[in-house]
Image: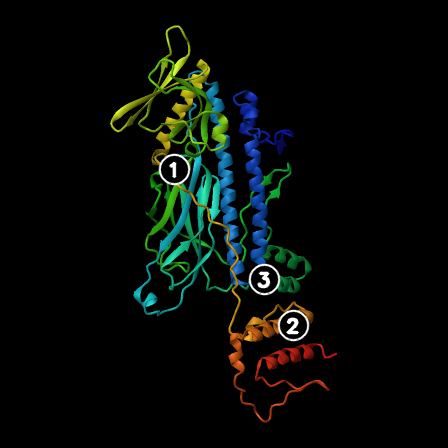
Amino acid sequence: MFCRNQTARATIARGSALEMEIRRGKFRQSVFLETPQDSDIQKKIDYEIRMREGACKLLAACSQRDQALEASKSLLTCNARIMAYMSELQRMKEAQVMQRVARRSFDAGPMDDRSPCKGKVAISDLRIPLMWKDTEYFKNKGELHRCAVFCLLQLGGEIFDTDMVMVDRTLTDICFDNTIVFNEASPGFELRVELYSCCSEEDYSAGSTPRKLASKLSSSLGRSAGKKMRAALEPGACSTTSNGGGATILLPVPSVPGPKYHLLAHTTLNLSHVQDSFRTHDLTITGNEECSYWLPLYGGVCCRLAAQPHCMTQQMMSGCLRVKLGGEPQGWTNVYGVLKGTNLFCYHQKEDMEANVEPVLTIGINKETRIRAAEKDPHSKAQNICITNQYGGEEVTHTLAADSREDTQRWMEAFWQQFYDMSQWRQCCDDLMKIELPSPRKPAIVTPKQGSLYHEMVIDTSDDIGTVTDILAHRIEEFELRAQLGSPPHWMALFDEDPPRSPHTHQHLPPHSPSPPSLHNHSDYVSLLHFLIYLMHPS
């Protein structure tokens, strides 16, 4: 049996070892209460479970190959996200327990609460070269082997997938044009790239075969036994089921007929692989030539891996300061300082920063910068901040002052945090790397077809006959105007000579209708259009 805390959704089994430890006082039950972060992750899990149910139903009903491949891809992605969210939830629970235990331990030493900032990590221009045999690629011999492939990328609890690409021996590289951005990466991130493949030559139209077999068995075995057999053969919902206490149990995905993707190769990228350029990384290949989903991979993956730490793109500290610009003792100027990236920007006022006005002074803050706090004078408790940089082989020191000792302490803490972030993100803080998101696809521009009267008069099939007559009337006015200007349309050359006619060809016209005009001058062309209008409206 299970008991559930009605206010916090904490599920603890009665009589379990955990409940006994809580009763003995070794753990607090509040440790296992659900936090807002836990609730958000649980909502994500529930959403992915519903998506998985839909993917299972769609896969079972698919009769087209492309539909089945996309549904199977969605199913695999949903399963990966569910497992990632569950692992993230487990890590959060363990971190909460360890944090509370460390705070309660009396022999624990001082803890350093400093942690590096998060950042964005983007991977783009994925290229995986192929190595076909000469007889397959150049001589085009052998059976045409086609596979559907896509990449699954995971960084922490974030999982993304690329578009599906069909690959055969006519391609020399597997190219994915997606730009994927992970927004909450830490400097110790591990980005796992997995390449999945599925043979596209199998028959996926048998999605309803188990249902047909179940129907035949249920009719031949009798109502009672056939009903049980039908329930066993039909693919059930791949969702969670509820126990007596209302908690959800995540069941494994049932076997659904349709294509199956297999892991073909994978690699793991980290901070050392980040570089603002196109690089090649080694792939670990898991398949072999005996597999139906096999592709002759060259053994590497090419991509651009870039990172933008928050300390390079966001304001880490801002506030009022006084800066000493000259050598005179009274040469102090009030400025508004903004610590961002590798610079401390000094503006006349805050409004100048918001209006993107050029700063009065820019002080470099990088890995070589030295910062120290010095007493302003023996009779004052306020401190100055001295920032020293190397410029052209010479040391240049800028002196800053805050309004109070507390403000000075906050600025010093911001500088130390900035140095710590730079030491953790390393080469990513040398220069701001560029992350370009793909622009939304624009619909293809349809150029008007030319070359004949038919191409110029093409209309939509949904248009009514009145629209056609309007177009013809407009053409009549256009032809008359061109005839006056002496510039006939380019398609008139088609009517310069009468085409040969068969003596057995007859044209059926309505009674009392005029004969088709002969085409010898501009008026004849106009008469032709009038004749077409009459055929559409004989009344």
Residue at point 45%, 50% (across, down): 178
**Which residue is nearer to you in this view: 126 or 532?**
532
Tags 3 and 2 touching, CB below 8 Å: no
Q: How crowded is mark 2: few (under 14 residues within 10 Å), some or many (20 or more)?
A: some
Element under disc 3 = loop
Q: Where is residue 256 in the image (x, y as percent from the top left)?
A: 54, 55
Element under disc 2 = helix
**Amino acid at pointer 3:** Ser
- The residue at which mark 1 appears reads as 432
- The residue at which mark 3 appears reads as 208
Element under disc 1 = loop
Q: Cα distance, mark 3 to mark 2?
A: 56 Å
Name the mark nearer the viewer: 3 or 1: 1
Residue 316 is at least partly visible in this image: yes
**Which residue is nearer to you in this view: 50 or 395?**
395
Q: Cα distance, mark 3 to mark 1?
A: 54 Å
Labels 3 and 1: the sequence-earlier one: 3
**Which residue is nearer to you in this view: 486 or 197?**
486
Q: How crowded is mark 1: few (under 14 residues within 10 Å), some or many (20 or more)?
A: some
| Above/below status of 379 relative to 349 | above
Q: Across the whole image, how many numbered discs are drawn on residues?
A: 3
Going by the picture, which residue comes out furthest to the bottom? 503
Labels 3 and 2: the sequence-earlier one: 3
Quadrant into which the N terminus falls:
top right
Name the mark nearer the viewer: 3 or 2: 2
**Amino acid at pointer 2:** Ala
